[in-house]
Image: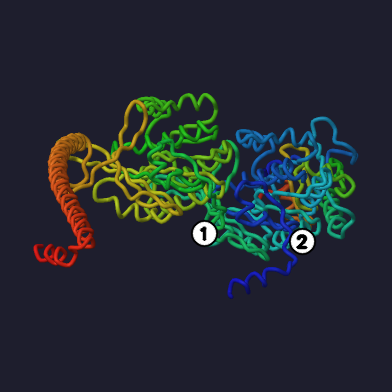
Amino acid sequence: MAKKKASKISKPSLPTLAKTPTGISGFDAITQGGLPRGRPTLVCGGPGCGKTLFGVEFLVRGIEQFDEPAVFVAFEETADDLTKNVASLGYDLKKLAADKKLVVDFVHLDPGDIEEAGGYTLDGLFVRLDLAVRSVKAKRIVIDTLEVLLGSLNDASAVRAELQRLFRWLKERNLTAVITAERGDGALTKHGLEEYVSDCVILLEQRVDDLMATRRLRVVKYRGSSHGANEYPFLIDEHGFSVLPMTSVLLDYKVSTERASTGIADLDVMLGGKGYFRTSTILVSGGAGTGKSSIAASMVNAACSRGEKAIIFALEESPSQIVRNMRSVGIDLDKWVKKGLLLIRATRPSFYGLEMHLLTMHKEIAAFEPRLVVLDPISSLMNAGSSRDVKAMMVRLFDSLKLRQITGVMTYLTTAGKMEETEAGISSLIDTWLEVRDVELNGERTRALYVIKSRGMSHSNQVREFLLGTDGVRLLQVYAGPQGVLTGSARITQDNRLAAEAQLRDAEAKRTENLLRRKEAALRAQIAALEAQFESEAEAARFELTEVARQVEREQAESAAAAERRSSGLATVGGSRRGGRR
Amino acid sequence: MATKKKPTKARKTARTSGAWPVAGEERWELRLYVAGQTPRCVEAFSHLRRICDEHLEGRYSIEVIDLLKNPTLAAGDQIIAIPTLVRKLPRPMKKIIGDLSNTERVLVGLNLKARAS
């Protein structure tokens, strides 16, 4: 019911706030479209947090992606300095200026050489802005940093009045403006600029936790629009500014019913006979040296064999080390790297903060567009942040993989005792969870693999022995009997024992069979004898019967002869005599 | 700074004409930036004339630049406020903003008077 209502309410198309996309990756997602069109936005933050860069990128992307000419009014840096500073990020301001798309106007204000004698306005600034805006027909403008005015000029009331006029002026010209401001103590800006810019305020911060710096962005307010209210980590690298939205908290990604092979035939069988679901998140957990990475590598190998792209993010080994190690189990990853199907990226978990990791992964993933992503091992990321942060990061990572329809394979190193607690945190995010466990028996260590869970498929509940050989990964049937699960040589012993038992059983059966056969033969003989006896007895009986019949015939013949004789005269006497004699 | 004023005055009495100063004398080149004929701009110009006549008689020139007519000239002297008086010569360049109604501040700004401490 509630759901229906909600959808009804959202249906009539309300006049939504017009927005100007910034083109900054991720930012438009959290603001649902960008900055308010034709209005000023305040971007505040401490020194070195990336305010200027945000502005520059807003303009450059506006020009490049949306063909909106722009003006950059710099109070703090000369045009040359600015051009040089952003050149390292791949922005060529000189070229944009030559193309009449951008005007960089450096407004120099040296408080030392200005004397104030009487009332004034900032018409000079307006004249310059107007000139700049008109010369390129600008739609976007960045003023960096307006507060310099307040810091350099003494007549604060005059300047404030002029600032108000400036914001009106910007709105009248329908300019989408970014005004940067220094962060003040306990206030958003040092000079209270936020009271002039009421439409949209963005706060940038740089924080250092455990020696690791993370940049974060927050939309403090956005009048007339919904926006993500969280703090979003962002990154400044050679490709510019990127914000990492926790986009898909909505859980509305498409799921796939397509299955793909893990590259280990027996494992596919265990997973309902068809392998894993694409876009699912697969966790391979296990102790040290249990072959987690090999399972992941098998899956990569299988994906690349199908012509799909894959990325391995290695957090503990170098790419060449991975290639070498996997070659020892018969998986040639180098081949795929050379073909351009596989990318191996290795970084130390402590090299950046968690967000940085996530962002760099994001960028790599967005650029390479793989169908399979391996993180080996995610447990080492635990060093890079608190477990809550790690979980939050995992959620975001898994979600973003799902959004992009990518299968994620994570390995997780478990250490005795600590396993449950940490894994419990992420287990709910995992679709398919394989566990590789050490089995120590008869002085050897073997590996057993089983499926802890696998959503959406009927999976095997068996424990299988897991074998790493030069020909790859194999799974073997293990024995689960009264002595427990048997693997390794115990399994072989058991094999032999079973074989012996089988032999014994065979012999026994043969003996019984022979016995039966002999019994049958004896019985058959007996039957034959009885039949023979019966035959002879029957013969005798038949003979006797014929004898009796013959006797009767003879007697009848005799009596008939006597009757004949009586009819010739001696009938009575003769007849009676004869009768009497008999 | 105060020492500068005295010889100037001494020379002033020695000179006869109010045209460009003769060789060796300080030449004052002033620019007044305005934006249209606003009362404040007109006022600033008259204040400036008065001050110059009092202190720099015959040795100054004033160039009035209307930014509404020549907006491109605003960037050259980094003009933000209107009106702005720029002392181009003598060096170093000095800027005074405002309607110049505060004569004291104008004189300080033009280095014609020591800053009261």
- Element at badge 1? loop
Residue under the point 46% across and 25% down: A334
Q: Pointer 1 indicates a residue of which chain?
A: A
User: Which percent across, then down, holds residue B91?
Assistant: 73, 37
Q: Which of A395 and B55 is in front in this view?
A: A395
- Residue B13 sits in quarter: top right
Image quadrant containing the N terminus of chain B: top right
Residue under the point 35% across and 39% down: A292
Q: Is residue A164 at all visible to an observer of this figure? A: yes
Q: Which of A198 and A306 is in front in this view?
A: A306
Question: Mark 1: which amino acid?
Answer: Asp
Q: Earlier in the sequence, mark 2 or mark 1?
A: 2
Name the residue tied to disc 1: A185
Q: Is residue B117 at all visible to an observer of this figure? A: no
User: Which percent across, then down, holds residue A108?
Assistant: 69, 44
Q: Which residue lies furthest to the left in this view?
A: A581
Residue under the point 42% across and 47% down: A272
Q: Which residue lies furthest to the front in this view?
A: A569
- Residue B73 sits in quarter: top right
Question: A294 left or right of A536?
Answer: right
Q: Residue A183, relative to residue A329: is it above or below?
A: below
Crowd rating for badge 1 (residues with CA inside 10 Å; few <14, some 14–19, many 20+): few
User: Which percent across, then down, holds residue A458?
Assistant: 41, 52
Q: Which of A14 and A4 is in front in this view?
A: A4
Please tell me the numbered disc located at residue A168: 2
Crowd rating for badge 2 (residues with CA inside 10 Å; few <14, some 14–19, many 20+): some
Question: B23 left or right of A331?
Answer: right
Foreground mark, 2 or 1, reads 2
